[in-house]
Amino acid sequence: MANSPSRHGQQIPAASVSTTHSLSSPRSSRTLRKLQSAHALSSNYAALSTPSLISQQRQQQRNTSSSQSPGPPQVPPLPSQQSHHRTRSNSDAIVPSYSNAGALPLRRTAVPKKAAVTLSTKDELETLVRQGPRGDVPTGLQRLRHLILCDGLDADNDGMSQLRIYVWLILLNTPPLSTDTYLDLIRRGPSPAYSKIRNDTFRTLATNPLFKRRVSEASLIRLLNAVAWRLHDAKVERMSESGKMINASSDLGSPELQHASPVVKHTQHPPTVTTEGSEAGGAEPGIYVQGMNVLCAPFLYAARSEAEAFVAFHRFITRECPGYVRGAMDGVHKGLVLVDKCLAIGEPKLATYLRSKGMTAEIYAFASVLTMCACTPPLPEVLQLWDFLFSYGAHLNILCICAQLLMMKDTLMASPSPTKLLRSFPPLQAKTIIELTLNWVRKIPADVYEELVHHAE
């Protein structure tokens, strides 16, 4: 039986034939067909790359059914792996059934619901600066001021903050400025005040290593010279107006031009000689006064470019304190008088003692009034104090000086000669000064506070 011929007359290996069933049974016939197919495939290697007749018939049936009714998507055939070992017959391969969509069902990932997130102060400040207020502008500005007062701007140990210069520009209501405009002012060369600027810049915050490391003298000269050109152009424009007053809120000129013409002012006030480095001319607005170098130093330190510092500084001196940069610096002298007046209101005992020693604000507070306390280190505390001043008004600098005197009260009262102590104020403590200033505001009468608001105009 092992040597009996097959149905097609081919010899079948004896070891591959089962002897438990007769050749006439259906099972033995199927076994012989399988063995014959396997033997044919092994003898003809080219047949491995060709699908079997059954596979071709099934493929033809699938194509016919897919043309009549949409069925499951066809699965791309697997790449044939040609190997030299004996492979299984395609006629006997198990064909997987695709009863559903021909692809594995996708699981829907459950997305957790977003919980209500409260923005931190830093995120809220950044959102206000980048996107603006969600409601009206006054409400957004009020919220911005409140965040600065309560939490302050996020800064490193050197006082550097990515948001500070932009917050200042917003609080000062600074209009946009093209960098080319600033560069055009630089290309004009030395201004009429250039020599006076050079006499002051080299000693600007000379003992402050943070400022010296970040801001060069050349940058300071360029900015002050550009501001001098801008003020000079405004001055020439005023003179050409034949005594007409330019509205401070107009976009045609700078806000510092809210005074009468030079001709009228000249008849009222004779020319006076002012501090070295300043420009003479009585109450006429000048283009540079000594102390402007220190006043613009924090802008250069906090800004990310000279153009930003330029537009912020120019806006500040022409809108917030134009009286500080006039030839006679009458705004500064008014502020000194207010220091003595406010000190007498809030701390009469200390004011009386200093007056008995001949110490008035004209002697010890001139630099602090002119520079908005920028002359007193450390610089990071100055920046924090300026955040407060720009938020609620630069006129509050007068009360900040009174607050510093209050912090020195015990030392001053115990000293027989307070002059030596007041030659230089102790290091700034911005948070304490702001708290004392807010308490001092409540003590100031309405008429005196009105003087504070308008003294620098």
Image: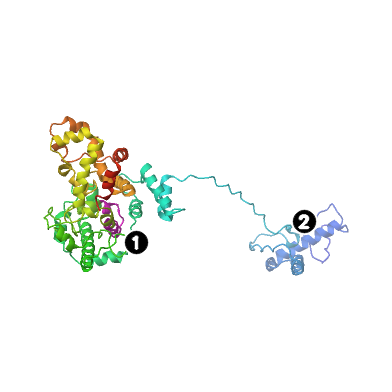
Residue 24's x, y, as percent? 88, 59
Image vertical order of residue 231 relative to residue 449, above or below:
below
In the shown orientation, is residue 232 left or right of residue 384? Answer: left
Helix, strand or loop: magenta stretch: helix
Element assignment for label 2: helix
Query: Closest to the observer: 279 or 304?
Result: 279
**Residue to which mark 1 is pinned:** 176
Tell me what residue is drawn at x 29 percent, y 66 percent: 180
Tag of residue 54 = none
Q: Amino acid at mark 1?
A: Pro
Residue 214's x, y, as percent? 25, 52
Image vertical order of residue 293 relative to residue 368, above or below:
below
Element assignment for label 1: loop
Which numbered disc, 1 or 2, marks the residue that appears first in the sequence? 2
Query: Closest to the observer: 285 or 92?
Result: 285
Q: Does the magenta run of residues contain 302?
A: yes
Quarter of the image with the N terminus in it:
bottom right
Residue found at the very far right of the displayed protein:
24
Query: Closest to the observer: 437 or 60?
Result: 437
Q: Amino acid at mark 2?
A: Ser
Neighbor class of circle 1 (other Cα within 10 Å; few <14, some 14-19, many 20+) is few
Q: CA distance from mark 1 to mark 2?
A: 94 Å
Neighbor class of circle 2 (other Cα within 10 Å; few <14, some 14-19, many 20+) is few
Query: Closest to the observer: 354 or 56?
Result: 354
Residue 159 seen from this side: no
**Residue to which mark 2 is pinned:** 16
In the shown orientation, is residue 370 left or right of residue 7? Answer: left
Residue 148 seen from this side: yes
Image: magenta residue range: 298-314
Which quadrant of the structure image shows residue 405? top left
Residue 5's x, y, as percent? 83, 63
